[in-house]
Image (cartoon, grey):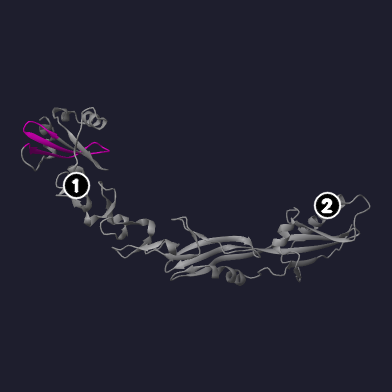
Amino acid sequence: MDTTDSIIHLAPVDQPTSVHQIAARLFPAYTIDEGGIHLAGCSLDDRLFVRFGFQQGGEPVEFYLDAAGHEVDAAQVRILGMSETVKLDGPPEPAEREIASLKELGRQIIEDRFSSGNAPEKVDVAAVWCKSAQGKLRLTVGQHSADLPFADWARTLEPPPFVCPYTGISTFHLAATDDGRIVPAEAIERCAETGHRMLSGELVTCSVTGRRVWGQLAETCPVTGQPVLREKMVECSVCRERVSPGAVRRDQCEACRNLRPLSKADPRMARLLDEHPLLDAWGSWRMSETRAVYVLVAAGWFRRLLVVVDRDSLDIKLLATGNRFTAGWNMVDRPQYDYVLHG
Ligand SMILES: [Zn+2]
């Protein structure tokens, strides 16, 4: 096989060749509210391929090897635009040794294809240099920024979508929250109380006012389970729990209005008696529960007992006594709990 000694150097005719062209391809894809975009590093590297062309049965045949000596499939040749090339003045970087070894590899491949003595007399060998582009885009709003890396063949490089680390949303339209996070514009919402721009997922809808507010400004009502602006929560006059005004009637929360008789065999009561054995001195229990507490009322001959217990810890949050024949409760101070529970 004969190969010309001084091979020609080619490049795809339509591949971007400058950082400026890369920027022009990427930037228009993004919309950044009150911000901008620039390249924070971009390099274009030339990757070597070697093309072998010859005649076989009167038809032109060609194949390509990449720098590692692997044959390039037809789809990749098309993607890289290697069949439409322009001539370069010389190699973009020194590669004599690599080209020599690829030529030798190509020669062996051609010899293996043809039975001995039938190998083509003339093989055209050309180096084709394809540019890869890598770098990162910097999206900025005021003092804040987020980087978006990219890496691909310069010819096929597409603007990568920004994948939000907070919401997982993939987007080309970005904006900043008031605390400087760069996020998808569609994920931003304004807190109706503070006016701050934040992620929609950080807001809740107050079930009393209907306003979308920062979650930290709201509490979850233990009766309704709904978020309520902290300042709108009210205290139940019986259990003293903070609840939604919607859960209160006649100053009593829904739990306190709906006490139900409870036997000592009830598993919840069994747990309570295990934790607070002194409760066993009382009887005629009625009970209700919220998401946060158990509300229990016991009745003796003359006295009544009100106990509010944390559902998780079983700590007594409130203890009060009352008269069997009058409404209203007298709060018991914590040091007096044992004395009172003895009945
Ligand atoms: Zn209550």
Residue 301 among those drawn in magenta: yes
Residue at position x 14%, y 49% in the image: 251
Question: Helix, strand, or loop for circle 2?
Answer: helix
Quadrant of the drawing holding the C terminus: top left
Residue 278's place in the image compared with 250, above or below, is above
User: Taking 113 as reference, is 217 left or right?
Assistant: left
User: Taking 277 as reference, is 95 left or right?
Assistant: right
Q: Position of residue 77 (x, y in %)?
A: 73, 60
Front one among 144 and 308? 308
Q: CA distance from mark 1 to mark 2?
A: 87 Å
Q: Position of residue 213 (x, y in %)?
A: 31, 59
Q: Which residues are magenta?
A: 298-324
Q: Position of residue 295 (x, y in %)?
A: 19, 39
**Residue on which the image places disc 1:** 253
**Picture quadrant where residue 23 is located:** bottom right
Secondary structure mostly seen in the magenta stretch: strand
**Picture quadrant where residue 269 is located:** top left
Quadrant containing ligand 1 reads: top left
Residue at position x 44%, y 69% in the image: 33
Residue 175's place in the image compared with 112, above or below, is below
How many residues crowd around disc 1 within 10 Å: few (fewer than 14), some, or many (20 or more)?
Answer: many
Identity of the amino acid at label 1? Cys
User: Taking 214 as reference, is 3 left or right?
Assistant: right
Residue at position x 83%, y 52% in the image: 109
Question: Helix, strand, or loop for circle 1?
Answer: strand
Identity of the amino acid at label 2? Ile
Which dot, 1 or 2, sits closer to the camera?
A: 1
Q: Does label 1 point to a residue whose CB lies under 8 Å from ligand 1?
A: yes
**Residue on which the image places disc 2:** 109
